[in-house]
C-alpha cells in the first residue's frame, strides 16, 4: 500500500511558530523591540510586503533565510542595515553600512520648519545630510522646493544622491564638503529660505549606550567635536548666518542637554532673532530654532520657549 505524501504545514502555522521562536531569540539577545523586529525579519525572509496572515505560500528557502537574518539581528546589527531600508516620514530610504541611519526623532525637524517658517519657501539647504533623509523628505513633501544637501563623507554623499534622485532628480543636489572649512560652491548657494540640520553633536567623552549605534554608526556622524560636542553644530550655525536670507529659518537638532549651549552659540554668532528650543515628542529639548535678521538685536536679547 502506497501512502500519500505528507502535506506541508500551512504557512500560517509555520509563521506562527517562526514568529514566537524569533521573538524569543531577539529578546534574549537584548534587542529593544524583539516582536516588531521579528515580524520585519519574517517578512524579509518571505520576500513580501503583504501582511503575513495573507500569505498562501512561503519561499523554499524561507527557514534558511530567516535563520541568516535572525543571526545578524542577534548580533545587534541594526534592523535597517539588514533590510537595506529605513522609513522616514513618507519615504522608504536606502541605507548602507558606514552611513548614519536616519532616526524617527529627526522627522520632527520638518514639522518645526512648517510651523515656524515665514514667507516663501523655495530654497532649502540641509547641512550634514548623511543619507539625505531630511533633504529627500523635504523634496517629497514640498513640491517646487529646490534643495541643496551638504555632506562631508563621500560614502554618505553618494547615498544621499541616490535617495534624493529617487524623489526628484531635478530639484535636489548634493555638495560634498567639510563645514569646518570652505566647501567649494557653498558660500555662493545663498541666500536661501531655510536650513535644516542634524549634525554630529555627541561630546568627546560620551559613549553611546546602544550596541547598534556604537558598532555600526560612523563615529564621524556621531561626535560633534570639541569637549562639548558642538564644534560642528557651531559651524552649522555659522553657515546659516551666511546663507539665510533675512527672515530665513534655521532648524538644527542637538542633544537634549545642549539647548542652552546651542542658543548661546546662535546668540554669539549674531544675526539671529527669536532664538528658541523645541522639544521632541517625548518632551526632551531637541531642536534649535533661530530666525535670521538683517541686523543684530540692539540688546542681544533672545526669546526662549523652553
Image (cartoon, rainbow, N blue to C red):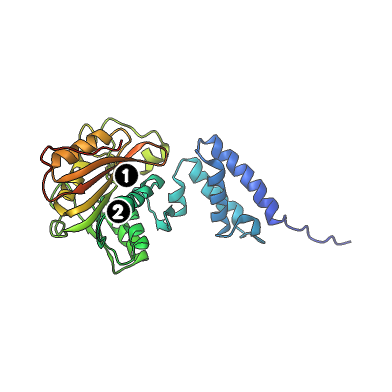
**Picture residue at 37% right of the left edge, 48% below the top:** 108
Res 152 visible: no
Viewer-proximal residue, 173 or 283? Answer: 283
Residue found farthest to the top: 205
**Picture residue at 30% right of the left edge, 53% below the top:** 156
Bin the neighbour count of mark 2 within 10 Å (Cα to Cα): few under 14, some 14-19, many 20 and up: many
Residue bearing the label numbered 1: 218
Quarter in which the N terminus is drawn? bottom right
**Left or right, residue 145 beside residue 85:** left
Disc 1 secondary structure class? loop
Expressed as whole percent of the image width and height from the top left, the position of residue 218 reads 32, 44
Disc 2 secondary structure class? helix
Res 37 visible: yes
Viewer-proximal residue, 228 or 212? Answer: 228
Quarter in which the C terminus is drawn? top left
Tell me, yes or no, whether the two marked residues, 2 and 1, touch with CB atoms within 8 Å: yes
Expressed as whole percent of the image width and height from the top left, the position of residue 86 reads 43, 53
Bin the neighbour count of mark 1 within 10 Å (Cα to Cα): few under 14, some 14-19, many 20 and up: some
Residue 169 vertical placement versus 45 (above, below): below
Expressed as whole percent of the image width and height from the top left, the position of residue 193 reads 22, 57
**Left or right, residue 19 beside residue 82:** right
Residue bearing the label numbered 2: 156
Residue found farthest to the bottom: 170
**Picture residue at 61% right of the left edge, 52% below the top:** 63
Residue 108 vertical placement versus 206 (above, below): below
**Left or right, residue 269 beside residue 92:** left
Amino acid at each position: 500500500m502506497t501512502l500519500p505524501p505528507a502535506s506541508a504545514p500551512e504557512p500560517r502555522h509555520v509563521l506562527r511558530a517562526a514568529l514566537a521562536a524569533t521573538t524569543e531569540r531577539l529578546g534574549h539577545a537584548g534587542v529593544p523591540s524583539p516582536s516588531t523586529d521579528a515580524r520585519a525579519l519574517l517578512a524579509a525572509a518571505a520576500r513580501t510586503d503583504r501582511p503575513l496572515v495573507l500569505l498562501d505560500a512561503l519561499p523554499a528557502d524561507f527557514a534558511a533565510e530567516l535563520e541568516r537574518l535572525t543571526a545578524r539581528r542577534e548580533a545587534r546589527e541594526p534592523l535597517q542595515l539588514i533590510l537595506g531600508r529605513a522609513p522616514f516620514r513618507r519615504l522608504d530610504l536606502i541605507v548602507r553600512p558606514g552611513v548614519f541611519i536616519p532616526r524617527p526623532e529627526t522627522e520632527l525637524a520638518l514639522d518645526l520648519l512648517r510651523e515656524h517658517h515665514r514667507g516663501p519657501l523655495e530654497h532649502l539647504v540641509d547641512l550634514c545630510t548623511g543619507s539625505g533623509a531630511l533633504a529627500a523628505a523635504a523634496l517629497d513633501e514640498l513640491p517646487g522646493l529646490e534643495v541643496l544637501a551638504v555632506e562631508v563623507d563621500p560614502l554618505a554623499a553618494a547615498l544621499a544622491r541616490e535617495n534624493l534622485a529617487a524623489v526628484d532628480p531635478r530639484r535636489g543636489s548634493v555638495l560634498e564638503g567639510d563645514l569646518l572649512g570652505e566647501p567649494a560652491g557653498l558660500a555662493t548657494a545663498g541666500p536661501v529660505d531655510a536650513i535644516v540640520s542634524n549634525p554630529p553633536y555627541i561630546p568627546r567623552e560620551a559613549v553611546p549606550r546602544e550596541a547598534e549605534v556604537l558598532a555600526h554608526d560612523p563615529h564621524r556622524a556621531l561626535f560633534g567635536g570639541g569637549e562639548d560636542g558642538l564644534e560642528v553644530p557651531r559651524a552649522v550655525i555659522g553657515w546659516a548666518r551666511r546663507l539665510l536670507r533675512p527672515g530665513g529659518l534655521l532648524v538644527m537638532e542637538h542633544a537634549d542637554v545642549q539647548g542652552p549651549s546651542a542658543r548661546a552659540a546662535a546668540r554669539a554668532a549674531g544675526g539671529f532673532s527669536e532664538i528658541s528650543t523645541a522639544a521632541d515628542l517625548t518632551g526632551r529639548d531637541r531642536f534649535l530654532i533661530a530666525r535670521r535678521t538683517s541686523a543684530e538685536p540692539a540688546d542681544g536679547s533672545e526669546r526662549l520657549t523652553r
